[in-house]
Amino acid sequence: MPQRSVIPDPFKFAAEGRSLIGTIPLAELSRLADVLLDKSGEVQFSLVGEMGIDRKPRMQLAITGELRVRCQRCLGSMAWPLGVKVQFELVRPGQPIPEDELEEDEFDAIEATPDMDVRALVEDEIVLAVPIAPRHEQCEAPRPDGGAVKESPFASLEKLRKTDSAE
C-alpha cells in the first residue's frame, strides 16, 4: 500500500518554514499509467514552506526524475528528464483566488486544505509537465513490414500527368 505524506496544516508549514523531502515510486502514480512505458523507478521531490515578502504563505515544490515514455514519431522508448519547479501561494478553502494571481506567472494559487496530500500535489505537477506528444530530437517514423518505403497512391497520377504534358 502506498505511503501517504500529508501536511496537516499547510499554513503552519509555510509560516514555520518547514520542508519535506521524499521519493515516490512511479508505480504509485496511477494517473501517469497510460503515459509511462516503464513504471519502475521513482521521482524525488522537495517541498519548502515560506512566507513571502508580502507576508503571504507560499510553498516551493521541486521534482526530479526520469520517465520512460513513447516517442510519438518513431514509437520507440525514450527517456524524458523530469525537472519541475513551481511556487504556490496558499489560499484558504472557500476563498476566491486573488485577481492579481491570474496575471502573475511567478506562482500559482492553490486551495490549501487541511491534511494536504503531498503525493497528489506532486502527481498533479508531473501530469502538467509531461508533453502531450513527446518526441526524440531526431528519429524516423516507423516503416511498414519489410522496411520498404510505401509508394504514395498519388504517384501513379503524377506519372500520368507527366506523360500527358510530354505529348
Image (cartoon, grey):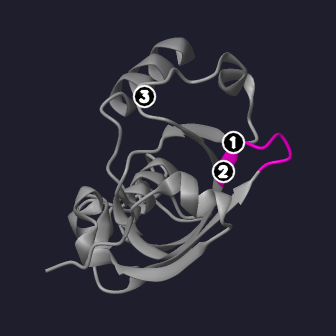
- Residue in the image at 45% along x and 17% along y: 161
Residue type, mark 1 in image:
Phe
Q: Is residue 71 above or below residue 105?
A: below
Residue type, mark 2 in image:
Arg
Quarter of the image where one finds residue 54: top right
- Tell me the residue that label 1 is attached to: 107
- Tell me the residue that label 2 is attached to: 58
Neighbourhood count class around disc 3 (C-alpha, 10 Å): few under 14, some 14–19, many 20 upward: few
Please tell me which residue lies in front, 163 or 104: 104
Confirm whether residue 86 shows in the render. Answer: no
Please tell me which residue lies in front, 52 or 142: 52
- Nearest to the eye among marks 2 and 1: give it: 2
Q: Secondary structure at mark 2?
A: strand
Residues drawn in magenta: 52-58
Q: Secondary structure at mark 1?
A: loop
Q: Is residue 161 above or below residue 143?
A: above
Is 54 one of the magenta-colored residues? yes
Residue 79 appears left or right of 59: left
Q: Position of residue 139 (x, y in %)?
A: 53, 65
Q: Position of residue 22 (x, y in %)?
A: 47, 82
Q: Is residue 110 above or below residue 13?
A: above
Quick one: quadrant of the N terminus? bottom left
